[in-house]
Amino acid sequence: MLTLPPREFKSGLAEIVKHGIVLDAAYFDDVAASARALLDRDPATLERIIGGSCRLKARVIERDEQEADLRAVLNYGHTIGHALEAASGYERWTHGEAVSLGMVAEARLARQLRLADASTVERQERLLTAVGLPTRAEGIDVDGVLTAMRRDKKSRDGRVPFVLAPTIGAFKVVYDVPPADVRAALASLAG
C-alpha cells in the first residue's frame, strides 16, 4: 500500500469504506475519523484499518462459504460499479472509483425507495469524498450502464439484485427495483 500510486491507493480504499457502510457502523466511524491519516499513509492507521476490513470480510466469507445471501453484502456498490466500468470500456475509472460511484448511486437509490434517510446517504458521500474517491460522474451513458446491468451475472430473469444500506452498518438485498428509480439514481451522479 505504501508504494502504490495515489490513484490506485485511493481506489483500494473503496472496499474499506464499503465494509464500514454495510457491515459495521463503529468501523465506519473509525474509518471516517482516520481519513486524513489514511491518505497520509500512516503505517499504524493503515494496519488498524486494513486489518479491520480484512476481519469483516473474512467473517462474512466464513459464515457464508457457498455465496448465498449473506455474502451478497460484499456486492454493495458493485452492481452499478461493474456496469459503469463495462459501459465505459474499462477505461474511465479504476475498479475502486467505479465502486465508489456505485455506492453513491445505490445509496441514493435506497433513499428514493425510502429505505434510507438523507443522513445515511450524506455520511457515505462525505466519507468517500474524504478519502479522495469520486461521488460525481459527468457524462455517463445511462442507457449503456442499464444495459450492462442487465448482463450482470447476478441478474436473474431480468431482475437485478441490489444490496442497499438502510443505515450505516446494515444491508438489505432488494429485487424488483423500478427501472425509473435506477435511471434516476444513475442520472443523479452527473449532478
Image (spheres, rainbow, N blue to C red):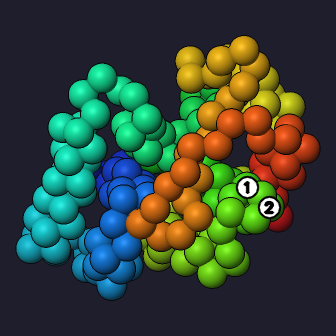
The residue drawn where x is 85% and y is 49% is: 181
- Given residues 42 and 52, the one toward you in this image is 52
Amino acid residing under circle 1: Leu
Q: Which residue is mark 2?
A: 112
- Given residues 114 and 57, the one toward you in this image is 114
Dividing the picture into quadrants, the one containing residue 122 is bottom right
Whether residue 14 is visible to the viewer of this picture, yes or no, is yes
Residue contact at pointers 1 and 2, CB within 8 angstroms: yes
Q: Which residue is mark 1?
A: 109
Q: Position of residue 157 (x, y in %)?
A: 72, 15
Image quarter hosting the C terminus? bottom right
Q: What secondary structure is found at the residue carrying circle 1?
A: helix
How far apart in space, not on screen, are marks 1 and 2 (Cα)? 5 Å
Amino acid residing under circle 2: Gln
Q: Is residue 170 left or right of residue 34?
A: right
Tell me: residue 167, above or below residue 66. Answer: below
Label 1 packing within 10 angstroms: few (<14), some (14-19), many (20+): many
Q: Position of residue 120 (x, y in %)?
A: 59, 74
The residue drawn where x is 42% and y is 66% is: 169
Whether residue 187 is visible to the viewer of this picture, yes or no, is no
Q: Position of residue 131 (x, y in %)?
A: 42, 70
Q: Is residue 137 left or right of residue 68?
A: right
Label 2 packing within 10 angstroms: few (<14), some (14-19), many (20+): some
Q: How many marks?
A: 2
The residue drawn where x is 55% and y is 51% is: 172
Residue 17's label in the rendered image is: none
Tell me: residue 20, above or below residue 95. Answer: below
Q: What secondary structure is found at the residue carrying circle 2?
A: helix
Dividing the picture into quadrants, the one containing residue 37 is bottom left
The residue drawn where x is 65% and y is 18% is: 156
Q: Position of residue 32 (x, y in %)?
A: 38, 79
Q: Name, please, the residue furthest toward the bottom.
A: 33
